[in-house]
Image (cartoon, rainbow, N blue to C red):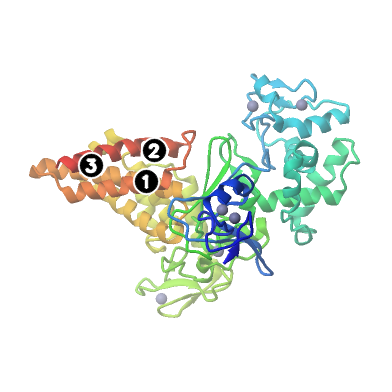
């Protein structure tokens, strides 16, 4: 029994959405809703020494449920950015833009000048007493490096409601201090801001804390071109996992949605992937160490086989041995590797040599299906089937083998079978190691559904019957596609796939019903 939030009468009834506050009656729940609404989430913020603040589910979270939806505390240009509009953060057309009449920063037009977003640097530039003058529009511009930091520093003036929340964010200033990145930031931002804006308003430490807060908590938001950086409050408490339980999507306004592609059990920690779940373990760990300054010890990182997929393994140097090469120690990808079968050790040079060539060959490859097949045939000699380099090329292949419906209809049977095989294998692989990579999984499910439909059409032509099981399989994958892409905005290509997927789904349901 807990006291009612309103009258303190002891009661067993809890708010069913958050499972955290109690009400004696529906009336008292309704009465308190305005006050409670802002805190009514299916999770609570917990704290321990190892993780700091983190989020714990307070009830079972259903598949596809949105767990957090929030507007950013602040947003601004990426630290390395070509000139962008200070309102909407999209790139600037050299011959078609205006400059702010108060401060000189480029804007795409009057509607962007009216936006509140630009107030911080506008005000600081006016205090400087001289307008900025941006002339170079191609490539990164040094002036833009400090803009987001300026917006963080002035958040107390431009958005007091968000300022208190912003102060609570992790900056890792002590850990960052003295590192190469920190020194570079000190020169390009910490010392640059007082000098350029001719201001004593901020201490060096304050500026470097703002830079740290941005780097540790910033999300790349793809709703502008180029993507911008934004900081979200509640989302910043989700911990990292390379097999996370939350997917991240953005609506067209750049608001962040964290949602559950699968059920999350009560008391589970909520997690997102701070790195890229599609990368192999060595690359993810290097990236996390460089950008977020910690070593990940999630279940995928602790298991060299990456949940049995051998996503980062190499084939044994001895061609006759069926074994796989993996690091001897799970936490040391830079140490020696050994074959799990014949125990033979190989030098780092051997491992690095293969991986570097495999990576460079993808980058320099002209992306055609034919080149993809050649690549796969060549690197199958060194890499196991599910290796991340082979998988990357297979993802390309699924899209390149028949790029649209017309091409699919005239595709050879052999290539259609390969498209089916690759798509199926990839979905299985990524549902194991990267279940929250919803845009990729949704796209693969759509491709697989189309290939199954085409295969069904061919079989029906030959045998005069409509293979119901195949139609049902095609429906299964198009429904999966809709589930994975359901929160994608139509400003993204995945949003367009979603629209088509819904049309195909409804048509398939109809066909199955009458067949
Ligand atoms: Zn009450
Ligand atoms: Zn509640
Ligand atoms: Zn604009
Ligand atoms: Zn201005
Ligand atoms: Zn990890
Ligand atoms: Zn071996």
Q: Residue at the spot x=48%, y=37% of the render? A: 489
As displayed, is residue 164 above or below residue 351?
A: above
Provide residue 398's location: percent of width, then percent of height.
Answer: 35, 46
Q: Residues within 10 Å of mark 1 (few under 14, many from 20)?
A: many
Q: Closer to the N terminus: mark 2 or mark 1?
A: 1
Q: Residue at the spot x=32%, y=43% of the render? A: 401
Residue 281: give its label: none
Provide residue 157's location: percent of width, then percent of height.
Answer: 80, 38
Instruction: Label 3: state its secondary structure.
Output: helix
As measured in the structure, the alpha-carbon distance from the residue carrying label 2 to the one carrying label 1 is 9 Å
Q: Which residue is mark 1?
A: 481
Q: Which residue is mark 2?
A: 497
As measured in the structure, the alpha-carbon distance from the residue carrying label 3 to the one carrying label 1 is 17 Å
Q: Nearer the viewer, mark 3 or mark 2?
A: 2
Count the numbered circles shown: 3
Q: Residue at the spot x=21%, y=46% of the render? A: 471
Question: Would residue 396 be visible to someone looking at this image?
Answer: no
Looking at the image, residue 43 sits to the left or right of residue 496; the answer is: right
Instruction: Label 2: state its secondary structure.
Output: helix
Provide residue 260's location: percent of width, then percent of height.
Answer: 47, 54
Residue 454: give its label: 3
Q: Closer to the N terminus: mark 3 or mark 1?
A: 3
């Amino acid at each position: 029994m807990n006291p009612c939030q309103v009258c303190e009468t002891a009661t067993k009834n809890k708010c069913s959405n958050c499972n955290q506050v109690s009400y004696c009656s529906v009336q008292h729940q309704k009465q308190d809703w305005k006050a409670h609404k802002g805190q009514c989430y299916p999770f609570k913020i917990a704290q321990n020494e190892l993780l700091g603040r983190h989020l714990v589910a307070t009830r079972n979270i259903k598949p596809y449920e949105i767990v957090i939806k929030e507007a950013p505390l602040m947003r601004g240009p990426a630290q390395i950015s070509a000139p962008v509009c200070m309102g909407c953060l999209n790139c600037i057309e050299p011959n078609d833009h205006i400059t702010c009449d108060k401060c000189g920063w480029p804007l795409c037009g009057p509607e962007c000048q009216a936006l509140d977003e630009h107030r911080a640097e506008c005000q600081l530039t006016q205090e400087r007493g001289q307008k900025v003058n941006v002339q170079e529009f191609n490539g990164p511009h040094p002036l833009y490096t400090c803009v987001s930091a300026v917006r963080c520093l002035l958040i107390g003036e431009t958005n007091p409601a968000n300022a208190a929340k912003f102060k609570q964010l992790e900056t890792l200033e002590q850990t960052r201090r003295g590192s190469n990145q920190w020194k570079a930031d000190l020169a390009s931002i910490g010392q640059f801001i007082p000098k350029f804006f001719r201001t004593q308003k901020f201490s060096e430490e304050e500026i470097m804390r703002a830079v740290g807060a941005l780097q540790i908590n910033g999300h790349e938001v793809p709703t502008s071109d180029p993507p911008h950086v934004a900081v979200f409050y509640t989302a910043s408490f989700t911990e990292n996992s390379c097999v996370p339980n939350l997917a991240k999507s953005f609506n067209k306004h750049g608001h962040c949605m964290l949602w559950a592609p699968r059920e999350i059990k009560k008391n589970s920690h909520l997690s997102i992937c701070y790195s890229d779940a599609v990368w192999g373990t060595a690359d993810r760990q290097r990236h996390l160490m460089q950008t977020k300054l910690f070593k990940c010890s999630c279940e995928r990182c602790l298991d060299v086989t990456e949940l049995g997929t051998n996503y980062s393994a190499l084939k044994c140097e001895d061609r006759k041995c069926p074994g796989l090469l993996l690091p001897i120690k799970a936490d040391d990808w830079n140490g020696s590797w050994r074959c799990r079968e014949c125990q033979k050790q190989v030098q780092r040079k051997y491992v690095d040599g293969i991986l570097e060539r495999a990576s460079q060959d993808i980058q320099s490859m002209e992306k055609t299906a034919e080149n993809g097949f050649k690549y796969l045939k060549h690197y199958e000699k060194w890499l196991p089937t599910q290796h991340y380099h082979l998988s990357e090329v297979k993802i390309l292949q699924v899209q390149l083998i028949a790029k649209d419906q017309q091409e699919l209809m005239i595709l050879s049977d052999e290539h259609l079978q390969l498209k089916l095989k690759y798509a199926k294998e990839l979905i299985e692989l990524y549902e194991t190691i990267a279940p929250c990579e919803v845009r990729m999984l949704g796209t693969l499910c759509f491709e697989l559904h189309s290939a199954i439909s085409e295969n069904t059409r061919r079989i029906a032509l030959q045998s005069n019957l409509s293979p119901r099981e195949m139609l049902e399989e095609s429906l299964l994958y198009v429904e999966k596609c809709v589930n994975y892409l359901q929160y994608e905005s139509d400003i993204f290509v995945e949003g367009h796939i979603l629209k088509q997927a819904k049309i195909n789904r409804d048509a398939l349901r109809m066909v199955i019903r009458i067949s």
